[in-house]
Amino acid sequence: MPPDENMPDFDSMSPEEIMAWMETLAKRQGADATEFTTEANVDIADVDPTSVQIDEPGYIPFHERDGKKKPAAASTPAQPPAQQAPPAQQQPPPAPPPPARQPSTPPPDRPARPAQPAQPTPPPPEPVSYTH
């Protein structure tokens, strides 16, 4: 497939040139110029939409791939205004949260265990040398 004359040669461009090219396209689409990291002023030729031939299916939503169709939304007929339920009555404020639990103490027949001292970290293993 021959290279498109409107497509740049990304392999020969620096990362800064590639970013300027992308930001120039973003600028055309209305992106916020204060977020650009380049001047976004690359000369990119406009493509005449009538000269483009689309030979692909284009975007297909995920739920429609492989012949699957999006499930139809459950249709529930809306009630006429005269038959709608009355507005909900004001609910009382929620109950306050329960007080914080105090740490439990061990039963009198079982004494509390003293805190265990921290164990020192063992030294790393010695390297193994293989000699013949």
Image: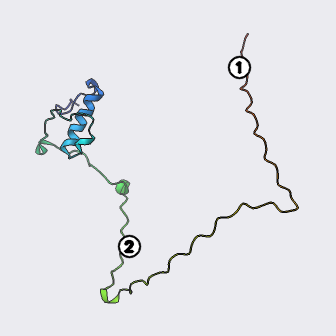
Q: Where 22 falls versus 102 (above or below)?
A: above
The residue under the point 36% across, 68% down is 72
Q: Nearer the viewer, residue 74 or 27?
A: 27
Q: Position of residue 50 (x, y in %)?
A: 11, 45
Q: Where 55 falls versus 69 (above or below)?
A: above
**Tag 1's secondary structure?**
loop
Q: Which mark is residue 127?
A: 1
The residue under the point 13% across, 45% down is 49
Q: Earlier in the sequence, mark 2 or mark 1?
A: 2
Q: Residues within 10 Å of mark 1 (few under 14, many from 20)?
A: few
Q: Where 103 falls versus 46 (above or below)?
A: below
Q: Which mark is residue 59?
A: none
Q: How many marks?
A: 2
Q: Residues within 10 Å of mark 2 (few under 14, many from 20)?
A: few
Relative to 1, 113 lies left or right:
right
For label 2, the residue is 74
Q: Amino acid at mark 1?
A: Pro
The residue under the point 73% across, 11% down is 131
Rendered-image quadrant of the C terminus: top right
Q: Nearer the viewer, residue 95 or 30?
A: 95
Mark 2–mark 1 Cα distance, whole angstroms, equals: 68 Å
